[in-house]
Image (cartoon, rainbow, N blue to C red):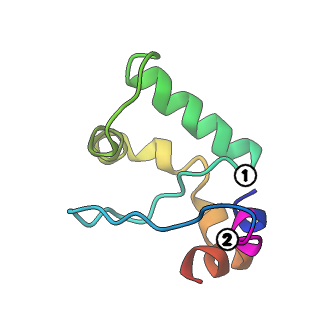
Amino acid sequence: MTRFLWKNKQRFRCGKLFAEEHYPSFRLTVDHPLDLELVRRIYGELGGSGIFPVAEVMALLKRKPELAEINRHLIEAQNYRAVVED
């Protein structure tokens, strides 16, 4: 999905958001079943309702690094890296 959006910028409003703080490389997208599993786990860990500031998500992933391992191997996929760094 991410790749499709970025490759079709004329059809979608795309941009990059920059945080005040540098966060480690986590894959926070829902392009693969393992991404969805991670997002569901994060959502459950943070109470299962509402919207959470990115700082809370990052703090959770730092406290529980095993969560980030769910989809970490997908970060190294060439297509994902090429889209994000484009």
Q: Residue 70 location in percent, x, y?
A: 59, 46
Binning the other alpha carbons within 10 Å of mark 2 as few (below 14), some (14 to 19) or many (20 upward) gives some
Write the residue at 39% across / 47% down. 65
CB atoms of marks 2 and 1 within 8 Å: yes
Q: Residue furthest front?
A: 10
Question: Which of marks 1 and 2 precedes in the sequence?
Answer: 1
| Residue where numbered disc 1 is placed | 31
Q: Is residue 69 above or below residue 20?
A: above
Name the one closer to the observer, 26 or 12: 12
Position above or below: 49 against 40: above
Q: Nearer the viewer, residue 77 or 17?
A: 17
Q: State the count of labels.
A: 2
The location of residue 2, given as percent across then percent down, is 69, 61
Q: Position of residue 42 (x, y in %)?
A: 47, 32
Residue at the image point whose x is 40% and y is 28% from the top: 51
For the record, the magenta segment spans 5-10
Horizontal relation, residue 43 to residue 55: left or right: right
Specify the quadrant that holds the C terminus: bottom right
Label 2, label 1: how many angstroms apart (C-alpha)?
10 Å
Q: Residue 27 falls in which quadrant of the image?
A: bottom right
Tell me which residue sits at (76%, 56%) in the image.
Answer: 1
Q: Is residue 24 left or right of residue 49?
A: left
Asked if residue 51 lies in the magenta stretch, the reply is: no
Above or below, comparing residue 70 to residue 16 in the picture: above
Q: Which residue is mark 2?
A: 80
Across and down, in percent, residue 78 comes to 71, 79
Identity of the amino acid at label 2?
Answer: Tyr
Tag 1's secondary structure?
loop
Give the residue drawn at x 31%, y 38%.
Answer: 53
Q: Amino acid at mark 1?
A: Asp
Residue 8: which quarter of the image? bottom right
Q: Say the numbered circle drawn on residue 81.
A: none
